[in-house]
Amino acid sequence: MNPNELKAQIVRKNMTMAEVAAELGIDRSALWRKITEHGGKFDRPEIQRISELLELSPDETARIFFSSEVEKTQQHSTPPATHD
Protein backbone atom coordinates (compact mmCIF):
# COMPACT_ATOMS: atom_id res chain seq x y z
CA MET A 1 0.00 0.00 0.00
CA ASN A 2 1.08 3.58 -0.66
CA PRO A 3 -0.06 5.53 2.43
CA ASN A 4 1.38 8.86 1.28
CA GLU A 5 -0.57 8.70 -1.98
CA LEU A 6 -3.78 7.85 -0.14
CA LYS A 7 -3.31 10.76 2.26
CA ALA A 8 -2.59 13.08 -0.69
CA GLN A 9 -5.80 11.99 -2.41
CA ILE A 10 -7.79 12.64 0.77
CA VAL A 11 -6.33 16.16 0.96
CA ARG A 12 -6.98 16.68 -2.78
CA LYS A 13 -10.68 16.02 -2.14
CA ASN A 14 -10.64 18.48 0.79
CA MET A 15 -11.64 15.72 3.18
CA THR A 16 -10.42 14.85 6.65
CA MET A 17 -9.48 11.46 8.04
CA ALA A 18 -12.55 11.71 10.29
CA GLU A 19 -14.82 12.20 7.27
CA VAL A 20 -13.32 9.24 5.39
CA ALA A 21 -13.57 7.07 8.50
CA ALA A 22 -17.21 8.05 8.98
CA GLU A 23 -17.97 7.14 5.36
CA LEU A 24 -16.38 3.72 5.96
CA GLY A 25 -18.22 3.26 9.23
CA ILE A 26 -15.03 2.92 11.24
CA ASP A 27 -13.29 4.98 13.90
CA ARG A 28 -10.71 7.55 12.79
CA SER A 29 -8.00 5.71 14.74
CA ALA A 30 -8.92 2.45 12.96
CA LEU A 31 -8.56 4.24 9.61
CA TRP A 32 -5.18 5.60 10.63
CA ARG A 33 -3.99 2.13 11.70
CA LYS A 34 -5.06 0.68 8.35
CA ILE A 35 -3.30 3.46 6.45
CA THR A 36 -0.10 2.87 8.40
CA GLU A 37 -0.63 -0.92 8.13
CA HIS A 38 -0.42 -1.36 11.90
CA GLY A 39 -4.05 -2.42 12.20
CA GLY A 40 -4.70 -4.74 9.32
CA LYS A 41 -5.46 -4.02 5.71
CA PHE A 42 -8.41 -2.51 3.92
CA ASP A 43 -10.92 -5.09 2.75
CA ARG A 44 -12.44 -5.00 -0.74
CA PRO A 45 -15.63 -3.12 0.21
CA GLU A 46 -13.51 -0.47 1.99
CA ILE A 47 -11.22 -0.09 -1.02
CA GLN A 48 -14.27 0.20 -3.28
CA ARG A 49 -15.85 2.85 -1.04
CA ILE A 50 -12.63 4.86 -0.75
CA SER A 51 -12.18 4.72 -4.53
CA GLU A 52 -15.71 6.04 -5.04
CA LEU A 53 -15.42 8.65 -2.31
CA LEU A 54 -12.13 10.02 -3.63
CA GLU A 55 -13.14 9.51 -7.28
CA LEU A 56 -10.03 7.43 -7.98
CA SER A 57 -9.37 5.95 -11.39
CA PRO A 58 -8.67 2.20 -11.56
CA ASP A 59 -4.97 3.01 -12.05
CA GLU A 60 -4.92 5.30 -9.01
CA THR A 61 -6.68 2.65 -6.93
CA ALA A 62 -4.16 0.02 -7.99
CA ARG A 63 -1.22 2.33 -7.34
CA ILE A 64 -2.48 3.20 -3.84
CA PHE A 65 -3.76 -0.13 -2.56
CA PHE A 66 -1.87 -2.76 -4.52
CA SER A 67 1.50 -1.23 -5.43
CA SER A 68 3.60 -3.30 -3.02
CA GLU A 69 1.80 -6.53 -3.97
CA VAL A 70 2.33 -5.81 -7.68
CA GLU A 71 6.00 -5.03 -7.10
CA LYS A 72 6.48 -8.27 -5.14
CA THR A 73 4.72 -10.27 -7.87
CA GLN A 74 6.83 -8.67 -10.58
CA GLN A 75 10.04 -9.33 -8.66
CA HIS A 76 9.17 -13.00 -8.23
CA SER A 77 7.86 -13.58 -11.74
CA THR A 78 10.46 -11.73 -13.78
CA PRO A 79 12.47 -14.34 -15.68
CA PRO A 80 16.24 -14.03 -15.52
CA ALA A 81 17.87 -12.26 -18.42
CA THR A 82 19.41 -14.47 -21.02
CA HIS A 83 22.57 -13.59 -22.82
CA ASP A 84 22.93 -15.12 -26.27
Image: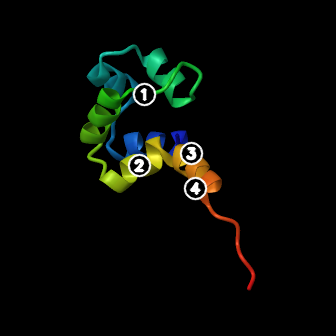
| Mark nearer the N terminus (1 vs 3) | 1
Q: Judging from the image, what secondary structure is the residue with disc 3 in?
A: helix
Q: Quadrant of residue 26?
A: top left
Name the residue carrying label 1. Answer: 42
| Residue at image mark 4 | 74
Residue type at numbered disc 2: Ala
Q: Nearer the viewer, residue 68 or 78?
A: 78
Q: Position of residue 39 (x, y in %)?
A: 54, 18
Q: Residue 75 is drawn in which quadrant?
A: bottom right
Distance in Å between CA atoms under marks 4 and 1: 22 Å
Residue that carries the numbered disc 2 in the rendered image: 62
**Mark closest to the chain's N terminus, 4 or 2:** 2
Depicted 52 relative to depicted 84: above or below: above
Report crowding for label 3: few under 14, some 14 to 19, many 20 or more residues within 10 A (C-alpha). Answer: some
Disc 1/disc 3 C-alpha distance (Å): 14 Å
34 w.r.t. 25: above or below: below
Circle 1: residue type: Phe
Residue of label 3: 68
For this orientation, the residue located farthest to the front is 84
Q: Which one is earlier in the sequence, the residue at label 2 or at label 3?
A: 2
**Alpha carbons under labels 3 and 4: distance apart:** 10 Å
Q: Spot the residue most to the right.
A: 83
Q: Residue at left 74%, top 86%? A: 84
